[in-house]
Amino acid sequence: MRDLMGLMKQAQAMQQKLADAQAELENLEVEGAAGGGAVTVRMTARGQMRAVSIDPSLLSPDEKEIVEDLVLAAVNDARARGEKLMQERMQELTRGLPLPPGLKLF
């Protein structure tokens, strides 16, 4: 019975840590870039877009497709960085816990 109580306390503590981590990830920002920095995107680690910056030299009608591709690449870069940041935070949080492999908490 003592082990069950200890496990319950550990689960509650983990639940609070996860809630804290989710709140933190809402505020942590990552930046993605494409075209050597001609297009940058800033977003939260959870994937909410905050800002897009496009170098004025790209803003001509002939460059429309290039700009679209660069924005897409910058968003994907920022998203990948955010996912990596989330994974790193979760590894820190769950270190030492007997969780099954492949369990995704976010």
Image (spheres, helix red, strand yellow):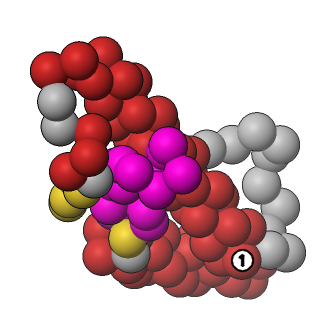
* Residue at the image position 40 percent from the left and 33 percent from the top: 70
Res. 7 visible in picture: no
- Place residue 69 in its image quadrant: top left
- Place residue 4 in its image quadrant: bottom right
Which residue carries the number 1 mark?
92
* Residue at the image position 68 percent from the left and 67 percent from the top: 88
Is residue 27 on the magenta stretch? no
Is residue 38 on the magenta stretch? yes
Q: Is residue 52 left or right of residue 74?
A: left
- Figure check: 74 above or below 55: above
Res. 16 visible in picture: yes
Magenta span of residues: 30-47
Magenta: main secondary structure equals strand
Quadrant position of the N terminus in the picture: bottom right
- Viewer-side residue, 81 vs 13: 81
Q: Is residue 26 left or right of residue 61?
A: right
* Count of marks overlaid on the render: 1
- Viewer-side residue, 100 vs 62: 62
Type of amino acid under label 1? Glu
In the rendering, at what x and y percent does residue 65 appear?
30, 16
- Under circle 1, the secondary element is helix
In the rendering, at what x and y percent does residue 91 appear?
73, 67
In the rendering, at what x and y percent does residue 37 appear?
46, 56
Disc 1: CA contacts within 10 A as few (<14), some (14-19) or many (>=20): few
Q: Is residue 99 left or right of residue 86?
A: right
In the rendering, at what x and y percent does residue 40 appear?
36, 55
